[in-house]
Image (cartoon, grey):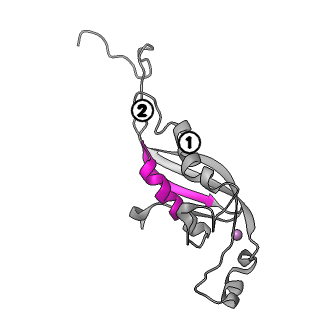
Amino acid sequence: MSSPAQPEGNADASRSRSLRGEVWVTRRAHFNAAHRLHNPDESEAWNREQFGPCNNPRWHGHNYVLEVTVRGEPDPKTGFVIELGDLKQLMQEAIIDKCDHRNLNEEVDFLHGLLPTTENLVIAFWNELAPRLRSGSLHCVRLYETERNYAEYHGPAAS
Ligand code: NI
């Protein structure tokens, strides 16, 4: 009561100020991988018709771009929702190290038996990332198969 109120923005420079609000933070990563779209429950003709060149028995590749978005309030001490270095490492260990320069049909343990469409991949990637995330909450896994085609998944709670 004795001292006049400090005007907003004239805070003590020796103290850190933080703001409240929910923020979406995204990290992007790249990997190259081969795959084949082929449903073994269906005939060769059905597969050729359905998947066209993506059914090529000798595989084909994509330059994938993976974007992972984490949602949360900035930590008052750090100002971060999540340390982007931590998110980079998480994506690297959970996804990139296992998928980069691999055959997605045959070489990735958590994709075994899965038809590796972009749709299935974003769900599988979410399932790998979500349990390992230490801060914030997983909001979106987006995967570009080409510059023009991507799929994104917001988790089971969003459906
Ligand atoms: Ni393809």
Q: Residue furthest left?
A: 1
Please give the label number shown on residue 89.
1
Determine which quarter of the picture holds residue 119: bottom right
Residues tagged 1 and 2 counted as in contact (Cβ below 8 A): no
Residue at 59 percent across and 46 percent down: it is: 92
Residue 60 in percent (x, y) is at 75, 68
Residue at 67 percent across and 65 percent down: it is: 149
Image quarter of the C terminus:
bottom left
Image quarter of the N terminus:
top left
Q: Is residue 143 left or right of residue 54?
A: left
Q: Which residue, given by chain and number where applicable, does mark 2 sit on?
A: 19
The residue lying toward the viewer, choosing from 148 and 67, is 67
What is the CA distance from the residue labelled 1 to the residue labelled 2?
27 Å
Q: Secondary structure at mark 1?
A: helix
Residue 23 in percent (x, y) is at 47, 43
Dot 2, how many residues are within 10 Å of its Cα: few (below 14), some (14-19), or many (20+)?
few
Residue at 67 percent across and 84 percent down: it is: 47
Vertically, is 76 above or below 30? Answer: above
Q: Amino acid at mark 1?
A: Gln
